[in-house]
Amino acid sequence: MQRGRQRKLFAFLLAASLLTGFISCESIDCTVDNVVTLNVGFYSSDDGSAFLLTDTLTVTAAGTDSVLYNRGIGIATVSLPMSYWQEADTLLLHFANPDETHDVTLIVGKQNTPHFESPDCPTTMFHEITGTTLVDPTGYIDSVGVTKNSVRYGSQENIKIYLHPAD
Amino acid sequence: MVHRRTSRYICTLLISLLSLTAEGREKEEQIPKAPLFCGVAVHADLAGPFMKAVGSKFSQMEVGARLNFRDHFFPICELGIGESNREGRENNNRFHTRAPYFRVGMDYNFNRKHNGNRLMAGLRYGFSAFNYDFSDPDFADAVWQQTASPLSLNRLHGRAQWLEVAVGCETKLWSFIRLGWNLRFKARLHQHVSDYGSPYYLPGFGKNGSSTFGGTVNLIFDIGRTTKKQKQPKTIIHETE
C-alpha cells in the first residue's frame, strides 16, 4: 500500500517536473526581414517599363553626412532607410556620368509610427507616406508617383520615378 | 463463395461486438452510479507561484471552482492574474503587463471507478482584456544621425480570446484534499492589439502566438458532498460439513 502511494507520488512529481520544463522552453522568433526601407523603382517615361540606370546614382540624406545609397549603376530599384522622427525626409539624388551630373531633390512627407515585435527584437519605425515633392532644376526626372503609402517590412515598391530614356 | 465468406466474417464480428457490449454492460452494472450532484471543489494553481519564485518571464496566479456531476462531468470556471516582466536578451527593451483573465469550460472524468483517482480531459474558453507597456531606452536613428529618443509606450490596450484542450489526472491526498496536474494545448481565437505591436504575453494564454502549450498543478479542496468509496457487500461464507 505504502509502496503504491510512493509510486503514485513519484509519477506525479515526474509529470509535474516535465510539465514545468516544457513550459520554460523558449526561443527567439524575430522577423527575418526586419529592415524598413523606402523602396523606389525607376521606370521609363515613354512606355512605363522598368528602367536600368545608365548613370551612377548616389543618394544622401540632407542635413547629415550619411550616404543612403552609394554609386549604383545599371539598377532598376533602390531601397533607402527613412528617418525615425522627421515629418519629411529630403533625399538628395546625384546622377552622374563622365560628361555631366544632375542633382535632384526628392522630399517625402510621412507620418512615423514606432513598431515592436518582441522585447528580443529590435524596435523599428513604420511610416505612412503623405506626399512627395520633386525639385529638379535640370528636368532629368519626368515625374514621381506613390504606389504604396505604407512603408513596412518587405520589399514592396513605394515610389515610382519616371525618367526620360536616353536618345 | 466470396459473398458467403464475407457474410460469415460480418456475422462473427457482430456476435463478438454484441458479446463485448453485453460484457461492458455487466461491468457497468457492477460499478455503482455516483449521485447526480457530488459536490463543489475549489482549487489553486501551484505552478504559477513556483514560476514567479524562480523568476520566470511570465507567471499566472490562478484559482478556480468546479461542480461535480456523477463524478464524471465537471463544469469549471477559473480566474487568475497573469503577469509578465520581460527584458530583451540582447537589448534593453522591456515589456510589462499585469491583468486578470477568465476561463470557463467543462472537464470529463474517464475513470469509471469512484476510487478518488481521476483521469480528466476538458475544454476551456479563455478571455482577457489587458493593458501592456513597452519601452526601448536605446531607440535611436543611426542612419539619419538624430539624437537618441528613448521610446516608452504605456497603457496599450489589448484583448484576447482562446480555446484550451486539457488532459490531466488527479488523486486524493487526504480526506477532502486532492492534487492534480494537467497539460493544455491553447489555440488563440482572436486578439485585438495596438498598432504599435503585439504583446509578448497574453494573460492566461501564455507567450503570444497562434497556439501554445501550458499546464497547471492544482491543489484541490472538495467542499460539501464528496464521493466516497462504495462499501463492498459483506460476503457470507457458509461452511459445509
Image (cartoon, coloured by chain):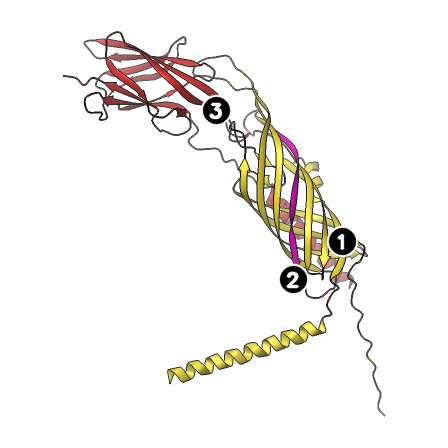
Label 3 crowd bin: few (<14), some (14–19), many (20+), radius 10 Å = many
Chain A rendering hue: red
Residue type indicated by callout 1:
Val
Across and down, in percent, residue A137 comes to 26, 7
Stretch in magenta: B96-115
Say whether residue A134 is left or right of residue B221: left
Residue B220 appears anywhere in the view: no
Residue type indicated by callout 3:
Thr
Say whether residue A137 is left or right of residue B189: left
N-term-proximal mark, 1 vs 2? 1
Quarter of the picture holding the N terminus of chain B: bottom left
Quarter of the picture holding the C terminus of chain B: bottom right
Extreme bottom residue here? B241
Chain B rendering hue: yellow
Label for residue A124?
A: 3
Q: Which residue is mark 1?
A: B40
SS at badge 2: loop
Name the main secondary structure of what is drawn in magenta.
strand
Q: Tell me the distance, in whole angstroms, between the alpha carbons under discs 3 and 1.
A: 51 Å
SS at badge 1: strand
SS at badge 3: strand
Say whether residue A159 is left or right of residue B187: left
Residue B88 appears anywhere in the view: yes
